[in-house]
Amino acid sequence: MKRTKTNILCLLLAALMLFSLTACGKGDKDDKTADSNLIKLGDYEILYKDACIMEDAYGNDALVLTLDYTNNSDETDSYLWSVTETATQNGEMLDIAIVYTDYDILAAVTDDQMEDVEPGQTMQIQSAFVLQDTTSEVEVEFEQVFGTKSGKITIDPSTLSREAADTGSGDTAAAAPTGSGDPLLDWWNGEWYGWWKMSACYGYYEEMDMEGQWWDVCGVIDIGEDYTGTVTLWDVDYTKDDPMALAEVSLNEAGTSEYGTVMSEGGWFTDVALEHADWIVDPGLTDYENLIWIDGNYENGEDAFYYEIYLRPWGTYWDDVDADSQPDTYNDWYLPMIEAGKAMPDVIGADAPEAAADSGNAATPAPATSPSGDIPGGDGIVTDEQVQKGYVYMSEVAKDIFNTTYEELVEYFGVEGKFDKEDYSDVYKTNMRYYKWISSENPHNFIYVNFMETEPGVYEISAYNTSGFSGTEAKEKYLDIVKAEAAEKDKAAAANTAMKDFSLEVTQFGKDDVKIKITTIIPESGWSITEDSLVENEDPDAFGAGFISFRVRESLEKLDSNKDSYKNFQEIDDRVIGGITFQGRTYSRIGYDWTEYVAQIDENRALAIGLVRLDCVPGTMPDIILNNMKFQ
């Protein structure tokens, strides 16, 4: 299966929504000075200008802020990669809102957050949040993505004007297919054709330059009288029997049109599981007849992207949309097929009455190397527990799974995988090999792993998927066990690691006299340092790397000024660090799951030590670093 292209930063939900600028009318805000609306975050400045209320894509009231973003750094940057924003109302964090300004091109209010801003330049951008109500105050906090500086503004929605968004031309197209029986089922069920694309690519997909890539896609929707069923999709690298996505769905009459809404309930997309409401498909949200739009966020370890899928019933003409909004093989393959009255085939490009066009949106070169006649492999048989634990290890515990070679995965499972096939990928321009590790108790339970030839003879994991068992249930059952097993291996490695002395002075922004010097030991290689953190990677900007962050304030009260906005807050055991007892807690904030220890160092200084993507198990490297920490 293809390893298709968003830790955060995956992580960041904001990165998964690309929106465009629209102007809001000014509300009757309190009389504020310009300075009170100006927030300085190190090299960046944010000026709050005004706000309004608009309707989001799901009919909710949304708070839309208009801001000036100034880049005072020495490098080109963007708002999205410099600033993290959170909004709180009635003590709860608000969700990011999707507020479209033109449905024809899927433009929305925050597109400009991704635009490059040159050093010394200012750009007007917008942010949007789903409101709980239109009367309670909203507190919006802005923080550095990499740093500790922050600032807040408070907005009273009851003083704001309500604005309408431009929703595009509203042109419609071909008539719906005919059918019999239940009108809803007749409309949804059948064969569909269209295209899908990637955006907001991170990790591997960014490295492979997958941003904006798109492919034709075919699909079958099969929903029964009980309004439950499946959506099966395949693109040029898949087939109907080996699909790109197989979603379990439910159909509801409720929606913005007479066609109701289809919602995912389970299944998978490429190599990740689909959960309840990951897909919410409402045809009424598009401005074209007989068009459905599926979107979602793909996240697998450090690799992520946002995907959009556009489908119309097989046989529908797409001449009501621009050429660049038609599927890639629309003219060369699809039109000859439907004009010849042919049914949708199980493989894109097959059965064409004329020569089929190239697959995908790129030319197909010759393979870099010829398929090998000496391919390693075995029976792939392991216990059912090993299959499920292997999936949990790959998806939740392994630190760099997509640089893992076939030989390294064989070492993990203890047996050679069962070889399935070898072929050449038009997308990645290299050879691919496909293996299975299969349950001895139930042959329908297995992990299917794709390996890509990254250099001659070296195959690394590019994607993986489950079959026959629930990945969610496997995580619930085995995650703690797999983490403990990995920790034992980490302890053995840490015990033999060469170490060096480390020191870092952390200062509170704007208060040079509030500072703490931190000393400890760290590995001689493999870790790096920023102005306020230790990073478990030689590249301090590496996407998805674990890190230990330090924040200093005058008091614990100052450290916890935003505590009420933390999600999933739980207290954990205290920890003695440098002879001082630190209070322990875990929570979610700015897209991270934090383990944090806080303490009052002396009467004028308090320190927070936060760990992200690092389990501080006794004997592992994070534990060694904390155990050797001292403060001055």
Image: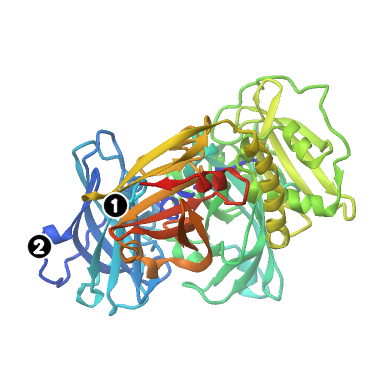
The residue mark sitting in front, 2 or 1, is 1
Apparent side of residue 109 relative to residue 447 in the rendered image (left or right): left
Q: Nearer the viewer, residue 484 or 345?
A: 484
Q: Position of residue 112 (x, y in %)?
A: 30, 48
Position in image of residue 90 (x %, y %): 35, 77
Q: Which residue is at the far front?
A: 579
Q: In the image, what residue type sits under mark 2?
A: Thr
Q: Residue at x 68, y 61 (%)?
A: 472
Q: Is residue 167 visible?
A: no
Toward the viewer: 164 or 147? 147
Circle 1: is it few (<14), some (14-19), or many (20+) Cα within 10 Å? some
Q: Could you tell which of marks 2 and 1 lies nearer the N-terminus?
A: 2
Q: Which mark is residue 287?
A: none
Whether residue 576 appears in this view of the structure is yes
Q: Nearer the viewer, residue 627 or 376?
A: 627
Q: Secondary structure at mark 1?
A: loop
Residue under circle 1? 149
The residue where tag 2 is placed is: 33
* 562 sits left or right of 118 in the view: right
